Image: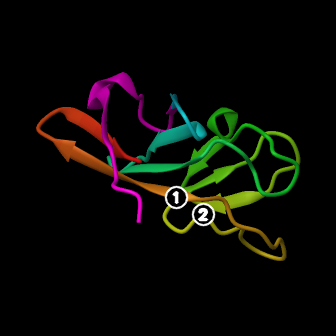
């Protein structure tokens, strides 16, 4: 089993409310999102449908809408919502004080 790496991403305020930030890792891009209720979520920056950049999508109600074909992805589970079927990997985000960390 691979040991998880704790990657410092930056300050909480670096990500605007309802916004995102992309972190480049050896495994590819990971998008970190901030919701209206100040929660942080991380998913692979690729929609399971046509691999659209989720970091460029609209954040709403704990979900993100892909900018390419409007697939809605749940930020907690990575699952596509509604009639769409698919899933993108999720990652743990840790907040320590005002600093964000990504577990990868």
Name the residue: 54% across, 34% down.
26
Residue 15 falls within the magenta-colored stretch: yes
Residue 102, image quadrant: top left
Q: Is residue 42 left or right of residue 88?
A: left
- Highlighted magenta segment, given as a residue range: 1-21
Residue 53, image quadrant: top right
SS for callout 2: loop
Pointer 2 residue: 78
Q: Is residue 60 left or right of residue 81?
A: left
Q: Position of residue 88 (x, y in %)?
A: 66, 59
Pointer 1 residue: 90
Farthest front residue?
A: 1
Q: Is residue 95 above or below residue 29?
A: below
Residue 95, image quadrant: top left
Packing grade of label 1 (10 A; few <14, some 14-19, many >=20) is many
Residue sitting nearer the eye, 50 or 66? 50
Q: Position of residue 83 (x, y in %)?
A: 84, 76
SS for callout 1: strand
Q: Is residue 50 above or below residue 10?
A: below
Q: Position of residue 19 (x, y in %)?
A: 51, 34
Q: Quadrant of the N terminus?
A: bottom left
Farthest left residue?
A: 97
Name the residue: 58% across, 45% down.
59
Q: Is residue 8 left or right of residue 80?
A: left
């Amino acid at each position: 089993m691979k040991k998880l790496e704790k990657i410092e991403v930056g300050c909480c305020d670096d990500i605007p409310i309802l916004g995102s930030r992309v972190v480049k890792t050896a495994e590819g891009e990971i998008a970190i999102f901030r919701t209206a209720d100040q929660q942080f979520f991380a998913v692979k920056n690729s929609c399971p449908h046509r691999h659209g950049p989720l970091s460029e999508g609209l954040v709403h109600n704990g979900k993100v809408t892909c900018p390419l074909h409007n697939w809605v992805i749940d930020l907690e589970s990575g699952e596509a919502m509604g009639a769409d079927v698919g899933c993108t990997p999720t990652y743990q985000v840790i907040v320590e004080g005002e600093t964000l960390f990504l577990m990868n």
